[in-house]
Structures are given as structure tokens and as C-alpha cells.
């Protein structure tokens, strides 16, 4: 069976939603369109504007069909999210924004029932970053919600449900620090029963399964061909990982960048991992456990640039930062990442002016050091492939390459949206060509080792 000519990929990130049309033969992106992923303040609590996203998805599908034609649809989304459906297939409750503080109010009660890290590979996270904590809080604040909930559908499959009328969960999304999944047995954790959700998780399906054909009335409304297959879909960082799993031999690492920076180490040992450092066990598209670590790098970058367009950091600016020990210490967002609870600060009070090259270089060094820390925590070895927006930050790539050294070469993926390629692969069954990677040369910066050592020491102590 030949691959679909054109695959439309619905890609819902935490900050932006995208629709990419991918060529099934070359895996090149033909066109990409995007919109902001807005969070509504409430009532009843901060929640994602699923109606606005659905209008965007339908409009983009219709436009891409009219301009190029669509032969298949695949889906990828951010993690830490699920949709609760009632018996009629409607929302039983709005989809909670996982950055809302609400679940912290019942943290003690939730901690009393959540499984150990040894069972789930899922660290205890703040806010609603553990999906189980979200559900526990929602059921506590609305005692009728559990009875009203007929099915829990992980987030990629919600969009598949709207397209096909069929429900599912995928293991990659269930395995994304939800507390609901045991990655070592590929089965639900004890928490599912404790939450009263036995029998309410939508059927488990592999990401590459066909969820179903598009609904006939929807196809007609959008001008799509009848019977277009819609694939089950996948968690976004695992979508970024998939092309490299198919093309490379372990050990290697993939750094998926966006709102979150997710570091994944193929071929590394799963244990021991330090759950206090925001490390976890992910599930890849083939159901294998993958040591992972993350921090909110894209969000931190946006905060650090303060609305200004940061200029590129040239070699002179980077050397000035390294020699002058100009440092930004973690964490810009202290609720996640390897230095949780640490409050950001500029070493010795030296804060470069936003918008100059020195500031850009210091921000790039901070992001590279946070990435290197994540990779080291999960025992990553071999090549490091960087996906997503950070591939356009040459200073970040150069500093990461200098930190990692020749035994761990840093390569930038050339795809605009690495998640789209991975999600499209679900519809093709295999990678026609290896991903295009651009190797980053290792700069001659003798100061980098001392800079890293001092940064790590001061970061560990929380000393500014």
C-alpha cells in the first residue's frame, strides 16, 4: 500500500496550534498555518478554548483541501491533558488548563492516593502537570462530575473523536507524567481505580492505528474526500522522537523544543532517575520506555526577552559572557525543570540590558546549560538532535555543542515543525528518507568548562 500523497497534521501545542500539510513521499512540509492557543479565564476555571481551536482546524483543513488536497489526517498535541466526555459524547466539563493552581489546593489528599514513582515513572509535579491531579481536583470540586463522565479521552484522540466519532487513548499520552499509567507493564496504574475511572478510559489504541474514517457530513462540509483515514495520533515530544527512532541506532538523544524543552535519551537505562529533578519515563510510539527530562524553555525565553526582539549573539558576545562569568541562574519558571524551587537571578547582580547581544548570549547560555543538565540527568549518550524553534538560535546550538563535546555531537533538524513529521509518519508506516540534520561545529571556547562548573555549583546552591 502506497503512502498517502498529502497528510494533514493537526498539531496542538500549549501556546500555539498548527496545521501542517506534509508530503507523504518526501516528508517535507508543503504549508503550515497556525493560531494562538487561548486559555479562557472561566467560569468554572481556566480552560482551553476548544471551540475556537475546532473552528481553526476545520477552516485550515478546508483551505488545504482546496489548495493541495488531503489524503489522510494525523494528530499530535501537548501532554498533561485529557477531555472528559459524557454519555452523549459532549464535554462533561471544560478541559482544565494544566497551569492553573487549583489542583495544589488538594495536593495533600492527592498525594495520599497517587502511586509511587517506581510504578509510574511519573514525578510529582506542581499545578495540574500530573493529569491525575487535575482529575482528582475536578472530581473534588464537582462531586457529580465523576458520574457524569462516561469516558476519559487523551488529548490527541479528542480531535480524532471530533473527526471520526470514535474514541481512544494512546499510550504515549497516558505515559506523559499522568500518574495514570505503568510504563513497565503497559497497563493502567493503581490510580485509575482509586479515582473511580475503571472502565472509563477510552480504548487503548496504538498511535499508528486508523481511528476511523472522517465523518461523512464533516467531509462534505469541508470539501474533503469521503472516507479519508484519521490516525489515532501521538503526544508531541514523542512525535518529534519518532523519525529519529526509525532512522538512528541508539544511543542518541532528541531535544524537542517549544513551550517545553523535552530531552529524551534513546538507549539509556531507565533507572535510577531522580524524580525531584523533573525526570520521567516517557512511552515512545512503539511502547518502549524512554528516560526523559524537561523544563519550560520556550516559555522562559519569552519571559526573558520581555517582548523585545533579541538580536543574534555573535561570537564576541558569547566569549564576553564566558570570560566575564555573566550568568543567569535558574529557574525562570521554578515550578518545573531540574532546579525546582530555585528563584532566577543574575550572578553578582550583573543583568545585561534586554535587547543587546550580551543579553542574548547569556540567555542562550542559560537555555543550553538547562538542556545539558536535563540530558545528563537521564544518562544521554551519543548524538543530540535538536528539534523545533530553538534550531533557529545559533548561539544556543553552539553553546550546547561546546558543552556536550565531540562524543555527543549536536545536530539541528531542518524541519520547521518536527512534531509534524513524526505525526505524519503514523500514516506512512515508515520513513522514506532519514531526517535532514545540520551538524553544529564545536567552537573553540576554552572558558566553557569553567563556566559550566561554576554555573552548576551556584545553581545547585541557589546562590546568586
Image (cartoon, rainbow, N blue to C red):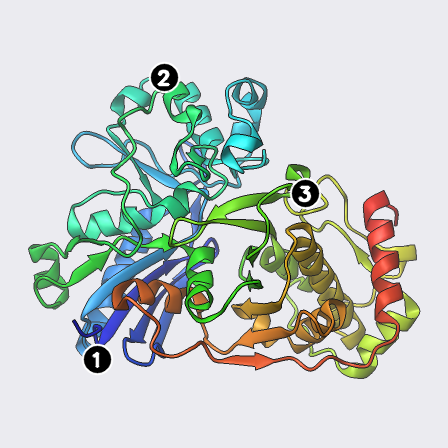
Can residue 336 be spotted in the picture? yes
Work out whether residue 233 or residue 464 is closer to the camera in this orientation and state it: 233
Q: Is residue 23 above or below residue 408?
A: below
Read off the residue under disc 3.
277
Query: What residue do we see at 57% from left, 62% from top?
Result: 251
As drawn, the label of residue 143 is 2
How busy is the neighbourhood of tag 1: few (under 14 within 10 Å), some, or many (20 plus)? few
x and y percentages locating residue 78 in the rendered image: 44, 51
Query: Which is nearer the N-term, disc 3 or disc 1?
Result: 1
Work out whether residue 421 or residue 214 is closer to the camera in this orientation and state it: 421
x and y percentages locating residue 348 in the rendered image: 92, 56
x and y percentages locating residue 169 in the rendered image: 31, 42
Can residue 48 be spotted in the picture? no
Read off the residue under disc 1.
67
Left or right of 310? Residue 89 is left
**Quadrant that contains the N terminus:** bottom left
Amino acid at each position: 500500500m502506497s503512502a498517502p500523497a498529502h497528510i494533514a497534521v493537526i498539531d496542538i501545542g500549549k501556546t500555539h496550534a498548527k496545521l501542517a500539510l506534509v508530503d507523504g513521499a518526501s516528508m517535507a512540509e508543503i504549508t503550515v498555518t497556525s493560531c494562538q492557543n487561548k486559555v479562557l479565564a472561566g467560569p468554572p476555571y481556566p480552560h482551553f478554548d476548544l471551540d475556537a481551536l475546532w473552528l481553526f482546524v476545520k477552516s485550515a483543513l478546508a483551505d488545504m483541501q482546496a489548495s493541495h488536497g488531503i489524503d489522510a489526517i494525523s494528530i499530535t498535541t501537548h501532554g498533561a491533558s485529557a477531555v472528559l466526555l459524557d454519555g452523549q459524547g459532549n464535554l462533561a466539563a471544560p478541559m482544565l488548563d494544566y497551569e492553573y493552581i487549583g489542583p495544589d489546593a488538594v495536593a495533600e489528599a492527592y498525594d495520599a492516593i497517587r502511586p509511587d514513582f517506581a510504578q509510574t515513572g511519573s514525578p510529582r509535579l506542581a499545578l495540574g502537570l500530573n493529569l491525575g491531579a487535575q482529575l482528582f481536583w475536578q472530581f473534588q470540586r464537582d462531586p457529580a462530575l465523576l458520574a457524569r463522565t462516561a469516558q476519559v479521552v487523551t488529548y490527541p484522540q479528542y480531535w480524532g473523536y471530533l473527526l471520526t466519532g470514535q474514541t481512544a487513548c494512546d499510550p504515549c499520552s497516558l505515559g506523559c507524567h499522568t500518574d495514570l499509567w505503568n510504563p513497565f507493564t503497559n497497563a493502567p496504574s493503581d490510580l485509575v481505580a482509586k479515582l473511580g475511572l475503571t472502565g472509563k478510559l477510552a480504548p487503548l489504541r496504538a498511535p499508528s492505528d486508523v481511528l476511523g474514517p472522517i465523518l461523512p457530513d464533516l467531509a462534505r462540509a469541508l470539501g474533503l474526500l469521503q472516507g479519508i483515514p484519521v490516525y489515532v495520533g501521538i503526544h508531541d515530544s514523542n512525535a518529534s522522537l519518532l523519525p529519529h527512532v526509525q532512522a538512528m541506532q541508539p544511543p542518541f538523544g532528541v531535544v524537542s523544543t517549544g513551550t517545553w524543552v523535552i530531552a529524551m535519551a534513546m538507549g539509556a537505562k531507565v533507572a535510577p532517575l531522580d524524580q525531584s529533578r523533573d525526570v520521567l519515563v516517557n512511552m515512545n510510539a512503539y511502547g518502549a520506555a524512554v528516560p526523559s527530562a524537561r523544563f519550560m524553555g520556550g516559555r522562559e525565553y519569552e519571559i526573558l526577552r520581555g517582548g523585545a526582539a533579541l538580536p543574534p549573539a555573535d561570537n564576541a558576545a558569547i566569549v564576553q559572557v564566558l570570560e566575564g562569568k555573566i550568568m543567569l541562574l535558574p529557574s525562570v519558571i521554578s515550578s518545573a525543570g531540574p532546579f525546582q524551587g530555585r528563584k532566577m537571578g543574575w550572578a553578582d547582580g550583573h543583568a545585561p540590558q534586554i535587547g543587546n547581544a550580551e543579553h542574548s548570549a547569556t540567555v542562550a547560555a542559560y537555555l543550553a546549560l538547562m538542556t545539558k543538565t536535563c540530558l545528563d540527568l537521564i544518562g544521554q549518550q551519543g548524538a543530540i538532535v535538536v528539534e523545533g524553534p530553538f534550531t533557529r538560535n545559533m548561539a544556543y546550538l553552539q553553546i550546547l555543542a561546546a558543552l556536550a563535546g565531540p562524543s555527543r555531537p549536536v545536530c539541528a533538524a531542518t524541519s520547521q515543525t518536527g512534531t509534524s513529521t513524526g505525526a505524519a509518519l503514523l500514516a506512512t508506516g515508515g520513513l522514506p528518507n532519514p531526517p535532514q540534520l545540520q551538524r553544529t561545529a564545536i567552537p573553540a571556547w576554552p572558558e566553557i568548562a569553567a563556566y559550566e562548573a561554576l554555573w552548576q555549583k551556584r545553581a545547585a546552591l541557589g546562590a546568586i
